[in-house]
Image (tube, helix red, strand yellow):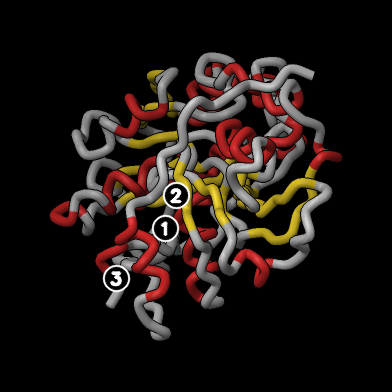
Amino acid sequence: MTKIKILYIIPVVAVSMLMFAACNDRSVSDNTLGETAFVPAENITAATSDQPLVVKLAVNEAYCKLTACSCIHDLASRDYAELQELLKSKYNIDLQITYFIEEYDLADTVLSGQYDGFISKPWLIYNQVYNQSEERDKNLKRIADLLDINNNQWLTGIFIVKKDSPLNSMSEINGKVFVAGQQDSYEKYHSPLTLLAKDNIVPSEIINKSSCLENLNILMDGDADVAVISDYTLTASCAVDVANPEDFSIIGETEQTPLCSVILDMSKVNESEALRLQKALLELSGDNAPAGLISKGFVHPAKWTPLRFSESSKK
């Protein structure tokens, strides 16, 4: 079994560790966005199909064959062409898609206003708004969630240890070396660090890495006692090349968050138009889903209010 070596580890600076231990009253979120799911006003009805509706979307999502990372290239065959044709012919909706291979290139467009919306991991979009305080009133709403190839709507972070580790509970992370993600990841950074802080669990050291594969390697090398990774990682092809799922034990899990969403900029698409697109997407789902979606398609957006783990919220 080939093992990919990571040549360096970047520890979080001491001040980041002190923010865990500074006090018992842990206000761990700076949540100013509120609920992200689209809930139209009671008096709003969907716009009719009499007039064409043009919606320009930027897309980067895990199972799209034009944007998927190499880790799941064998599973990523999602194609939106048939969906676009059906939306146009049946609903008079012109869904214009621009694909972004690199998710950070898509993220750079969030505040530019050049697109009407996005199909991506929701945190990729909302993190950009969080990072610009003057833009936090930007009205971005998830009108639908997109199912993965197993018709799963959810994503979590899982806390893992090596199979022979003596650790078997979350509380035992206290005083241990923990490897997590970076601030652009919700399930590997904000959600797990919020969970630890709420339970007064203070690692002796926190290492931050940009990928699940790096976290796995650091754990296997013995440079960390516990790692948090995305829940799909251990079955992704690149992780299977490094380790088997049987090599690890799961000792905890974060809360569920939407895996992928259709997000609209409500300053560019009004509620009636958003409802029109939502209804069309939901009608072209389930048993009516185009084969190219490689799943049952879209579902109503789950309620989700992201909780941001922020240094500025510490006392």
**Which numbered disc flags the more N-terminal residue, 2 or 1?**
1
Q: Is residue 42 left or right of residue 227?
A: left
Residue at the spot x=56%, y=76% of the render?
199
**What separation in Å lies between label 2 and label 1 (alpha carbons)?**
6 Å
Q: How far apart are marks 2 and 3 (CA)?
A: 26 Å
Query: As displayed, is residue 11 above or below residue 73?
Result: below
SS category of the residue bearing label 1: loop
Percent x, y of residue 287? 77, 36
Point out residue 311 in the picture as x, y percentages from the top left corner. Answer: 30, 63
Where does label 3 land, which residue?
A: 313
Disc sitting over residue 36 in the figure: 1
Given contact means CB atoms under 8 Å apart, are the residues at marks 2 and 1 in contact? yes
Which amino acid type is marked by label 3?
Ser
Q: Which class describes the residues within 10 Å of circle 1: few (<14), some (14-19), or many (20+)?
A: many
Image location of residue 211, percent across then percent down? 52, 34
39 vs 178, nearest the viewer: 178
Label 2 environment density (alpha carbons within 10 Å; few <14, some 14–19, many ≥20): many
- Residue assigned mark 2: 142
